[in-house]
Image: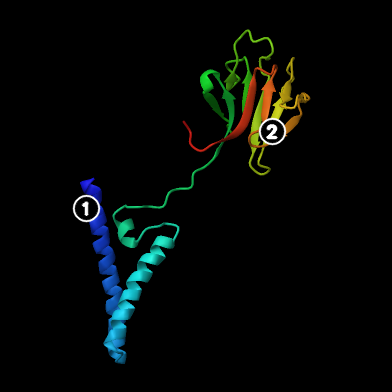
Amino acid sequence: MKNKTTKYIAAIFSDIIIIAALNAVIYGIFVFTAVNPLLIWLVAAITAILYFTVFLLLPISATPGMLMFGLKKSAPKKELFPCVFKKGSGGKTKCYLIPEDGLVFGRDPYMCGVLFAPREPAVSRCHCSIKYNQQTEAFLLEDLGSSYGTFTIDGKKIKPSSFAALKNGDKFYVGADKNEFYVGFQKELQ
């Protein structure tokens, strides 16, 4: 805490020095042009107010003194990662990140990112896959020729080797309705 307080004090003094330098330039101009001294004090006050107002309204939300000492840097934009979610027992939700080449559901431990039990009767070895298309902002669900089928939440069966476009929050199920998933985004990878 003491270290951060010291940094804030140093940042304030740095900003005061910058404002003083600006005012010295303004003062030199006013003295050279023989302007009323009261106007010099008014301009000095306005300069200080504008200095802090402008830097605090910018997206970086920091004065040069604060940036110099590593305080209040702009937060990086958080990327959203496309995922498939499965609600589990106890209210816990499992998140599966969708890689660029897609995520495969099934029983084959070597081919599938979402793995089912070896004796799950409603799920094929490589049952279905899902990809996220950034251009269309759609999740593309494909049945890979499964025996029991892949379904959207309204019960519509997806034909093998064809895609169903899903939006953020849409649900689907694999083989049986107990294997329900939904698509969405995760702000941070866990």
Q: From the viewer's perspective, tell me whether residue 59 is left or right of residue 159.
A: left
Q: Classify residue 23 by image quadrant.
A: bottom left
Q: Is residue 160 above or below residue 28?
A: above
Colouring convention used in this rendered image of the protein: rainbow
| Residue 123 location (% of width, % of height) | 67, 14
The residue at the point 30 percent across, 86 percent down is 30
| Residue 185 location (% of width, % of height) | 57, 36
* Residue at image mark 1: 6
Which amino acid is tagged 2?
A: Leu
Q: Is residue 126 above or below residue 101?
A: above
| Residue 102 location (% of width, % of height) | 62, 30
* Residue at image mark 2: 140
The residue at the point 59 percent across, 11 percent down is 117
Which amino acid is tagged 1?
A: Thr
The residue at the point 38 percent across, 70 percent down is 50
Q: Classify residue 137 by image quadrant.
A: top right
Who is closer to the viewer here, 6 or 142?
A: 6
| Residue 11 location (% of width, % of height) | 27, 59
**Crowd band around label 1 with a 10 angstrom C-alpha radius: few (<14), some (14–19), many (20+):** few
Q: CA distance from mark 1 to mark 2?
A: 53 Å
Q: Which numbered disc covers residue 40?
A: none
Q: Is residue 156 above or below residue 44?
A: above
Who is closer to the viewer here, 111 or 116?
A: 116
**Crowd band around label 2 with a 10 angstrom C-alpha radius: few (<14), some (14–19), many (20+):** some
Q: Classify residue 53 by image quadrant.
A: bottom left
Q: From the viewer's perspective, tell me whether residue 14 is left or right of residue 138.
A: left
Residue 73 visible here: yes
First in residue order: circle 1 vs circle 2: 1
